[in-house]
Amino acid sequence: MAERRSGDDIVTEYLDQNPHLVEWVESLRGVHETNKQWHARREFVLRNMETFPMLQPGFPSPSLDKLLSLSMCWANHIFLGCRYPQPVMDKIKEMGEGVVIHDVPVLKTRDEIMGKGKRSSGSDIDGCSKRTKTGPSESRPGNTFKQGPSAQAPAEHQPFFNRLYKAVAWKLVSAGGFGPNLDHFEILRACTESLKETLICIFVPLKDIPDLPAARTQIEGQVCELRCQTVYLGTGYGRDEAAARSMASKEALKVFQGRKVTVKICRRRFNGRDVEDLVLLDDQPRNPGFPPAISYPFQAEQEGDGPS
Amino acid sequence: MGVPAFFRWLSRKYSSIVVHCLEENAKECNGVRIPVDTSKPNPNEVEFDNLYLDMNGIIHPCTHPEDKAAPKNEDEMMVAIFEYIDRLFNIVRPRRVLYMAIDGVAPRAKMNQQRSRRFRASKEGVELVDEKNRIREEILQKGGYLPPDEIKERFDSNCITPGTEFMDNLAKCLRYYVADRLTNDPGWKNITVILSDASVPGEGEHKIMDYIRRQRAQPHHDPNTHHCLCGADADLIMLGLATHEPNFTIIREEFKPNQPRPCALCGQKGHELKDCQGVAREKKGEHDEFADSMPASEQEFIFIRLCVLREYLERELTMASLPFPFDFERSVDDWVFMCFFVGNDFLPHLPSLEIREGAIDRLVGIYKDVVHKTGGYITENGFVNLERVELIMEAVGVAEDNIFKKRKEDDEGFKRRNKEKKKRMKAQQRGPAYLTGGQFAPQALGGRGRPEVVQNARHQAFDMRMQGRDQMNRDAAQSLKAMMKNGGQAGTSDGQDGRGVKRKVEDSDSEPEPEDVVRLWEDGWKQRYYKTKFDVDATDDEFRKKVVKSYVEGLCWVLRYYYQGCASWKWFFPFHYAPFASDFKDIKGMFTDFELGTKPFKPLEQLMGVFPAASGNFLPETWRSLMTNPESSIIDFYPDDFAIDLNGKKYAWQGVALLPFVDERRLRAALAEVYPNLSIEEIKRNSLGSDVLFVGKAHPICDFIQELYREEVKEGTEMPAELCHGVQGTLNLDEDPIIPDKLVRSPVPMLRDIAHNSAIGVKYRDPQFDDNYVFKAVILPGAKLAAKVLKPGDWERGNNRGRGNWRPQLGFNANRQQAHLDQSAFRTLGHSINRQQQGGGQYSSTPPPGNYHQGNYGRPAHGSGGGHSPAFPYSRQQGLMGAPPPYKPPQQYPSPQRGGGGGGGGHGWNRSMQTQGTAYQQNLQRGGQGQGGYTQHRGQDDRSRGHTDNRGAHQSYNSGRGYALPPPSRRYNWS
């Protein structure tokens, strides 16, 4: 609460000091804007005024329109749920820094509604959207402000996994087929290493994971995530690290039971956000419902470091 | 109008307004197609004077049809449009005027809706292509077969917006088309054609209304002109009523719910894209002889007779013992106004008024209740009396709480029933009959899904028992197969551990419903609604008032738009949601008048206002970059992705798209910078055009126009009224006119140039009136009202002396001549029908052919399920030739027809008749009357006639109809 006060206070104070701006800034208000929306946008406009040196309060000018346009982008993003091309998003994020809004409405964009089948349902329940105080930069789930894998990444990794697929297939044949009594980790490790790659295991204590399905809230235990060449293979739970790793390998090997494996970019939860991740999939059309990622190798800026 | 349910509701409640069209088809003789001579009398036994085409209702289905393959290129689209117009012309056969109106730039009030449609269409188009590619790949991997994908560019339906090259082309093509028909078609010889293309501002239907309104207001107008307006929008009905012309008919494609659409991938019907399996087509019939005989596959047309609707309304609205004289015309206007509360293109509908929940009946009830308080009508000539509106709103507001509670109850009941139905349906087999199921179901090569043994036998046994109970008449072996197949599927998807499958809580394919946070059925709904929809606190009265004020303005604007024309091009409703009826307090002073002298957008400006960035290719380059460049000063109008509030609905396309509103000032300012970049061609496309009037050489006014060209008259010339059936207007010379004996080049390569053109074209302008002129919403003096069609309320059988012989009426003509079958015809019939066949008799389980009364809306159309059900001519024979219906007099065959033929004033059976070959059935009914046996069956008529749902009677008529497949020939031999 205190923080919001200050936000409004700053504006009031500023306008007290610059009374000539009051009338002008009020003339920028749209008919459809609520007080809340307008106050936020007003702050946005006033905060960014000096970055538009050509702007002269009281006179229409292209730079004023540019500022207004960006302020509308920002407000539309926060209050209506619109998304703009990435350069615009980056810009308004930067400009909106410091403007604090309470109680940001939770909205689903059309893409999110249409792509619902692709994402694990139920994982939306996270603290992010319910926070009472949120800066705009992290107000909306689904913003890909963070860097993800590049669009060509799947194609780059695909040849390796084609080879891995073959290696696994032969290994399983010699082991007598896929079944519960194998040492799944050994098989996967041997195969990756035979192709001169390493299998990366990331362990996290179960209790450190914020947004797990409610059914898995046993406090004890470890979670293991397997990746190879940054591509996600599988996640497993277990009493200790070895058991978790074994489960994760078993999950990963299930993917290799299909007719082929494909590297794709999929949306997953990571640290309470939706991120794009590289994932290995089989050819079965189904709802993947990934468990939340516990590591994320595609971060450019280390702003939210995961518990890795 | 944004109320798809409106027409359905209307046609169910006032069923006699619908009349099926009779259409004469072109004949073929020795391989030569003989076109229909439209100068012959209209087979519908009515003559229309004017035909108005709301062209957008034609352009859309012709350019991206839903029920057949899309045309390959623009030329094919144009030809499809020409054919469609020809078809309409053949049905309606106007004798005086053909008015074609394409949507021009719309008022700002419409822009929000247009934006939302175009932003969605753009995303949907891309998604469909992606989905198709994905599924195609999947199917091919599994070894399925799909016909090769023709490489064609995706047609972006967004180009059907004024200002695009496509629309410009279309206008050129239509000019050519008109010139061609005026020159070559005898039916067009004497008519006046007015073409109002996309360069003339205004929505198509409103341009038409403007034309009618202005013609009515000038002294030479013939008050008994018979108008026929073509278009599917429900608001055409409102517009038609608003004209107060006594003879007004609307023609539209018959709405058939749940029509099977071909799968976008394999082109077969019976499944949707996402269920496509890429299997070979199943044979229809033993030798695949029914391959293309999808029942009722061609779109039929229906007429909607507004004079009959007026009759119905007169009954419903007439009030006795009023403190003021009752004027039916005024009450019609009020009715039209109240329909706007339920939905229109310009305002979101009030949350408590839902057409499916009988909102209009509720409003009419309230209207009659409060009339004593209001002391008069709520509208006059399109101007609203807000004090009286407030009283109506107050009454609605009182009921609001209960409406929401009832809605919740109904909704839950519906969900429950739906779930049960789904359960039943799920048990039925899917896929073609030759596909084996269970253990023997086809499996992808090398796939993981190996056939599995039956798991959890108890569960399967239970399912089988349950299914057996529901479907006594199903073939046991088949259902067993189906069960095993379902079991097999479950096993492959999640039974990998080899353990038993637990029953799931919910159907796997039922998506979780989004949580409704507003919960209108619980206390505190108003606060929650304003909080979630507008993001304001309940205490913010000022904001709420602002919304109500805008809505009140909106109601005034809409009514004015319908009765007087566009009052302000600028006004719009700046919110995404409507307020509650109970919020309409002290609205009297909320509206005074609209800003005068507003101007419409230019076409390209409007494109900038309604297009998403993805459709920017229709715009000049520098204009386009304003939609994408992060430095653009209007970049906020063009989000990539936007939120959709499902608002209690299930699908994204039903929800409210939360798009930002366009700031007109900023748009104009930004465009001012790029205006200099327009090419000459683009400048031309961006300018406002004019209506064009065409006539053929034989028309009396042709010489007059030719004279104008010869003398090169510069200023506008009034049309002499006597030359053109009293049509008035101003003529101006066209810069590049179509003139007799001047070659008209064909814009479509597959059509010939017109070498000996005999048409002439000239710019046309509607009669102009003073700015303050008020068009009167009254019946004109000299107008003759149409004859009554409905059964008089106090009419009784046998007690009709002195009040004329009322008789149910089909079609337009009360005294239509009925044809009959002679003796030999019946011998032939009897011969061709197997009399030994003892089908289910009269109460056979075969359903009657789809009709409105049977509540067929929710059910898939017959035969849609991939051909398990027999094609319906066969099924119907059974019902007929079994035990004769009890009312059937024993003497001869024609008698059962009389009851049905005379009685079915509703269009229920009529529809099946249309699909089965019309002329033949016509003959049957005529037989009834011809034999003079009418009166003795009147009792029967009566029963089916009364609008109390006498379903039993209808059923038996239906199954008792259809003697056999009628011969394909059609004869129109009434005189």
Image (tube, rainbow, N blue to C red):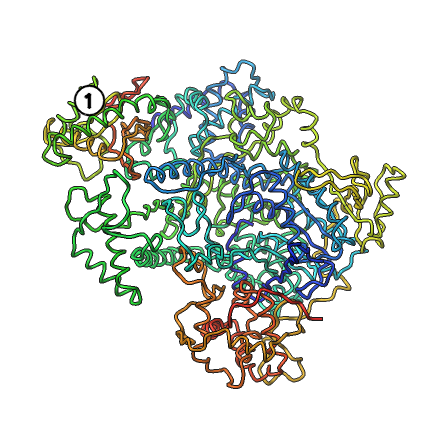
| In-front residue for pair B871/B308 | B871
Q: Is residue B40 above or below residue B435?
A: below
* Residue type highlighted by circle 1: Thr
> Where is residue B496, by image quadrant?
top left
Q: How many marks?
A: 1
Give coordinates of residue B655: x percent, y percent: 44, 44
Q: Is residue B518 left or right of residue B896?
A: left
If the image is split into quadrants, where does the C terminus of chain B sit? Answer: bottom right
Q: Is residue B262 above or below residue B374?
A: above
Residue placed farthest to the top in the image?
A53
Q: Is residue A164 above or below residue B798?
A: above
* Chain where mark 1 sits: A
In the picture of the structure, the residue carrying the numbered disc 1 is A192
Q: Is residue B241 visible?
A: no
> Where is residue B429, by image quadrant?
bottom left
Q: Is residue B427 above or below residue B132?
A: below
| In-front residue for pair B132/B729 | B132
Give coordinates of residue A97: x percent, y percent: 40, 21
Give coordinates of residue B216: x percent, y percent: 75, 55
| Secondary structure of residue under mark 1 | helix
Q: Is residue B11 left or right of residue A242?
A: right
Q: Is residue B529 visible?
A: yes
Give coordinates of residue A207: x percent, y percent: 16, 30
| In-front residue for pair A255/A166 | A166
